[in-house]
Image (spheres, rainbow, N blue to C red):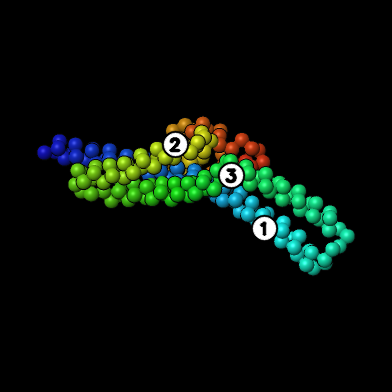
Amino acid sequence: MSDASGSHTDEANTVRTKCWDGALHAYGTSFMFQRRARILGQRLNVLTYIGFLVPVIIGGLVLAYGHFKSLPTVIAIASAFALAQTVVSLWSVVGGWVAGYSYSATSAADNARLAKRYEDLAVLPPDDLTLFRHEYEKILIRDESRQEQDYQQGVNEAEKRRGLRAAFRQYERECPGCGKQPISMEPTDCDICGNFDHNPIRRIRGRLWN
């Protein structure tokens, strides 16, 4: 009887461990896509702002002063900004910024929900082992479907390492590479939870980018 009870406990602990691992990876993926969405959103906001700013400035100057001596120069400068904005807008279309932003925001939210479901199940598992496994498998099926879509988004290794560092910090895990528990998002030289930002200026101002 004790052997059966011990086996039951071992299986339950195994499923619980899988839940915590699933939560960790889902959280890291959510963090990664949340960052993507933030960066793409900022770029799109700048494009929209410049697109409105140039005609508003020209229109405001003409309404306020009519035809003034420096107007051709102002128009020439504004035209240069407008041309640059057109070029960047074309780049955003080719690069899929709008679609990328929409996908990243959706994936970040969905992965965050998956992480929470894994975590809740690990903290308060059902007493019935069969039900416990069933609930875990339900989350896993949805998680695997999400992963299949996420893998098609061209995620690079640096993004993965940043996401893992965020997850290790969130769940107070030691990195298997450097053996340290991250307490910040400052990049390190670790090939598992670091090496995700090689720009020295951004490394100095890292908190503005994380």
Residue drawn at x 23%, y 38% is: 11
Badge 1 is on which residue? 52
Q: Find residue 93 and name its label.
A: 3
Q: Callout 1: helix, strand or loop?
A: helix
Marks 2 and 3, how far apart in space? 21 Å
* Mark toward the start of the polypeptide (2 vs 3): 3
Marks 2 and 1, how far apart in space? 36 Å
Q: Is residue 24 visible?
A: no
Q: Nearer the viewer, residue 186 or 45?
A: 45
Q: Nearer the viewer, residue 76 or 173?
A: 76
Badge 2 is on which residue? 151
Q: Is residue 64 left or right of residue 12?
A: right
Q: Nearer the viewer, mark 2 or mark 3?
A: 3
**Residue 36 % position (x, y):** 53, 45
* Mark toward the start of the polypeptide (3 vs 1): 1
- Report the amino acid beneath label 2: Tyr
Q: Quadrant of the N terminus?
A: top left
* Mark toward the start of the polypeptide (2 vs 1): 1
Residue drawn at x 36%, y 41% is: 145
Q: Residues within 10 Å of mark 1 (few under 14, many from 20)?
A: few
**Labels in figure, total:** 3
Q: Callout 3: helix, strand or loop?
A: helix
Residue drawn at x 47%, y 46% is: 103
* 14 vs 116: above or below: above
Q: Callout 2: helix, strand or loop?
A: helix
- Report the amino acid beneath label 1: Phe
